[in-house]
Image (tube, helix red, strand yellow):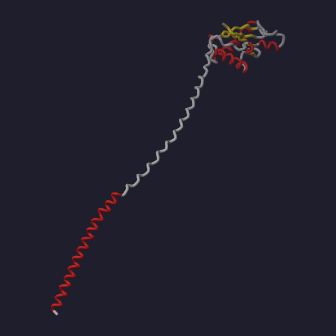
Amino acid sequence: MLKKSSVWLVVLIAVVAVAFIATGCAKKQVVKEEAAAKPAVEVKKEEAPAPAPAPAPPPPKEEAKAEAPAPAPAPAPAPPPPKVEAAPVAGKVAPPDLRGLRIQFAFDDYNLSTRSKENLEKIAGWLSKDNAAKIQIEGHTCDIGTPEYNLALGERRANSAKKYLEGLGVNAARISTISYGEERPMVPNSDEANRSKNRRDEFLQSK
C-alpha cells in the first residue's frame, strides 16, 4: 500500500513537473512570437507607402488692376482783373450845359431858391471831377431901378452863388464873378414875364 502511494506521488510530481516545464516553454514561445511579431509590424509600418502629398494650393488669382484714377479736372480760369477806371484827366472832363443851369431870382432879391441850389450842386459835381476847370458867374437884373443899383444887385446875386459853391468844396480861386446889372437882358424887358427871366445868374467856363 505504501509502495502504491509512493508511485502515485512520483507520478503526480512528474505530471506537475511536466506541466510546469510545458507551461514555461509555452510562455517562452509566446514571448518569442511577440518579439518576432513586433519587428514584422514595424517593418510593415516602414514599408507602408508614404501618404500622397497634399495638392498644391491653386495660384492666387491676380487682382484686377486698379483702374487708373480719372484725370483731375482742369482748374477754372482765373477771373479777369477788375477794370480800374482811369482817374479823370484835368481839363478833359466835358462841362455840363451851363446855360441850362442858370438860376433865377425874385424881384430885388439875391437869395437862392431850392432849384437854384440843385443847379449849383450839379456844377460843383463837375468841378470836383475836373480840377483844372474854372467858372465865371454873371449877375443880371431887370431894368427896374437905377443902373448903379442894378449893378450892385447883380454883384450880390453872383456872390450868393459863389458862396454856395465854396460851401460845397469848390476852391474860391476857381470861381470869378462879374455883374452886368441890366445891361445884358436875356429877353426884352417888355413885361413882367420877361423881366422875371432877366433876374438871373449865368455860368460860363473860364480859362
Asked where in the image residue 113 lies, by quadrant, the reply is top right
Q: Residue furthest right?
A: 190
Can residue 164 be seen?
Answer: no
Front residue of this view, candidates 42 and 7: 7
Taking the image as shown, residue 175 lies to the left or right of residue 61, namely: right
Q: Position of residue 148 (x, y in %)?
A: 73, 6
Can residue 48 be seen?
Answer: yes
Q: Position of residue 37 (x, y in %)?
A: 30, 65
Q: Residue furthest left?
A: 2
Seen in the picture, residue 52 relative to 102 is either above or below; the reply is below
Taking the image as shown, residue 11 lies to the left or right of residue 41, namely: left
Seen in the picture, residue 57 relative to 154 is either above or below; the reply is below
Taking the image as shown, residue 70 lies to the left or right of residue 94, namely: left
Residue for point 71% across, 13% down: 157
Looking at the rendered structure, the number of numbered marks drawn on it comes to: 0
Front residue of this view, candidates 17 and 77: 17
Asked where in the image residue 33 lies, by quadrant, the reply is bottom left
Front residue of this view, candidates 145 and 65: 65
Residue for point 57% across, 29% down: 74
Seen in the picture, residue 169 relative to 36 is either above or below; the reply is above
**Which image quarter is the C terminus in?**
top right
Q: Position of residue 136 (x, y in %)?
A: 68, 9
